[in-house]
Image (spheres, rainbow, N blue to C red):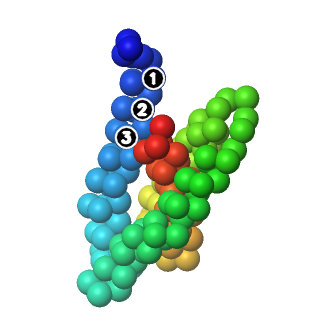
Amino acid sequence: MKLNYKRTFFIGLAFLSISAFWQMYDNIVPLILQGTFHMNETITGMIMAADNVLAVFLLPMLGSLSDKADTRFGRRTPFIVVGTALAVTFMMLLPLADNLESLGLFVGSLLFLLIAMGLYRSPASTR
């Protein structure tokens, strides 16, 4: 069995983007919540824990959905591509919400960002 370098590179790229996102999320989002929106540590912690709560429900559901999908691009590739594009889009809304000091836009963008991350995190992990 020969190592497929192209496939290994793209799988590594997916994990790189997932790891980079979580580093940004864990370090920057609490600073924005406490600095811009003046939230205490308890509420900040509850918002930061939302990704774990969503992951309990989303990851198995989206993983199962990607296993059943059958497209010309493969089973998991559409989930990874669409999830990545949505995650980047919603991630770009976070600094906009910070600059506008719009808590609704920030929390809404964060919620959809976490859903988009779940959309491609589970299929990328099982690839």
- Distance from the alpha carbon under mark 2 to that under mark 3: 6 Å
Q: Residue at x 48, y 37 (%)?
A: 127
In the rendered image, which quarter contains the N terminus? top left
Label 2 close to label 3 by CB (< 8 Å):
yes
Q: Earlier in the sequence, mark 3 or mark 1?
A: 1
Query: How far from the left and from the top, in percent, is residue 86?
Result: 59, 49
* The disc label shown at residue 11, or none: 2
121 lies above or below 113: above
The front one of 75 and 18 is 75
92 lies left or right of 18: right
Q: Secondary structure at mark 3?
A: helix
The residue identified by callout 3 is 15
Label 3 close to label 1 by CB (< 8 Å):
no
The front one of 33 and 126 is 126
Q: Residue at x 37, y 40 (%)?
A: 15
Identify which amino acid the numbered label 1 is placed on.
Answer: Arg
- Distance from the alpha carbon under mark 2 to that under mark 1: 6 Å
103 lies left or right of 34: right
The front one of 20 and 60 is 60
State which quadrant residue 12 falls in.
top left
* The disc label shown at residue 7, or none: 1
